[in-house]
Amino acid sequence: MIAEKFKFKWSTQVRVEIAKDIELVKLMKKAGCHTLYIGFESTNPDSLEAMKKNQKVEDIVQAITILQRHHIHIHGMFMLGFDNDNWNTVKETVKFARRSKLTSVQFLILTPLPGTDYFKNINDQRRIQFKDWSLYDAHHVVFKPNHFTMSELQKAQIYGHKKFYSRFQKVKKLVFGNFIGFFVNIYARHLNRTWKKKNKIFLKTLELLKPNQIADIFIDYREKISLNWVEKFRIPKMIEKKLQ
């Protein structure tokens, strides 16, 4: 890319080990690397060990320091919901992300994907509550966590995004000239508001799912519709009158 004198900016997804090769980092920057997406996953040592990530918090800190020193933006991805996680570890993770001055973050929800050992384990424990695969996107809680209710874990994700992309953080990024972070903040806040609006029913369902309670939940979903199509399709007057 350098030899061909490409001028475009690019991004890619890597692990924290990338920072151990300083020469490679320098070449990536020279070749036009703009942002690196990194799965930090957690700042809880117990959770990192449980997921067999083969990385320590010290490795995460070192990677952030080196990449920022070479003016490469970092999109940090963190996972919430491991059996060792609780509200304290969530808050510490959010504090770490803000303190590290990451350009952007995602706080994702641990999702037991079919075919994995984790899915088999918690399925055997009867902890999976939803098997609607459209919910398996790392943004919806689908299983019973260890130290949270399902609703609390979902709120933990919402809390993380709300704190990282707060109005204060937006102003702070603007004052210090981090314009990319500023615009990402605006975009992320819009995404969060939109997600909550679209998932009102799901969020309410989680509140109804109380621990250690077996219940059937029926949702009465109603939506206002327009009957302008009556005239469009020339439905007979008798039917039209009944609809009215």
Image (cartoon, grey):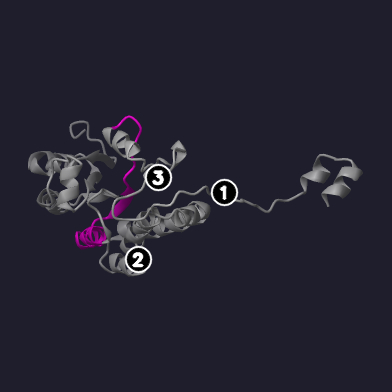
Asked whether the residues under the numbered discs 2 and 3 touch, taking CB atoms below 8 Å apart as contact, a structural biologist would say no
Nearest the camera: 62 or 170?
A: 62
Circle on res. 142 = 3
Name the kind of residue labelled 3 in the image.
Val
- Residue drawn at 39 percent across, 52 percent down: 212
| Residue 73 relative to residue 27: left or right | right
- Say which label, 2 or 3, has the lower sequence index: 3
Range covered by the magenta-colored residues: 88-116
Task: Name the residue beneath numbered marker 2.
Answer: 166
> Which image quadrant for residue 238?
top right
Quadrant location of the N terminus in the rendered image? top left
Name the kind of residue labelled 2 in the image.
Ser
- Say which label, 2 or 1, has the lower sequence index: 2
Task: Name the residue beneath numbered marker 1.
Answer: 218
Q: Position of residue 61 (x, y in %)?
A: 13, 53
Badge nearest the viewer, 3 or 1:
1
Dot 2 alpha-carbon crowd within 10 angstroms: few under 14, some 14 to 19, many 20 or more: some
Q: Position of residue 6 (x, y in %)?
A: 25, 36
Q: Distance between the residues labelled 3 and 1?
A: 17 Å
Nearest the camera: 114 or 144?
A: 144
Q: Is mark 1 on a helix, strand or loop?
A: loop
Asked whether the residues under the numbered discs 3 and 1 touch, taking CB atoms below 8 Å apart as contact, a structural biologist would say no
Seen in the picture, residue 88 relative to 218 is either above or below; the reply is below
Circle on res. 202 = none
- Say which label, 3 or 1, has the lower sequence index: 3
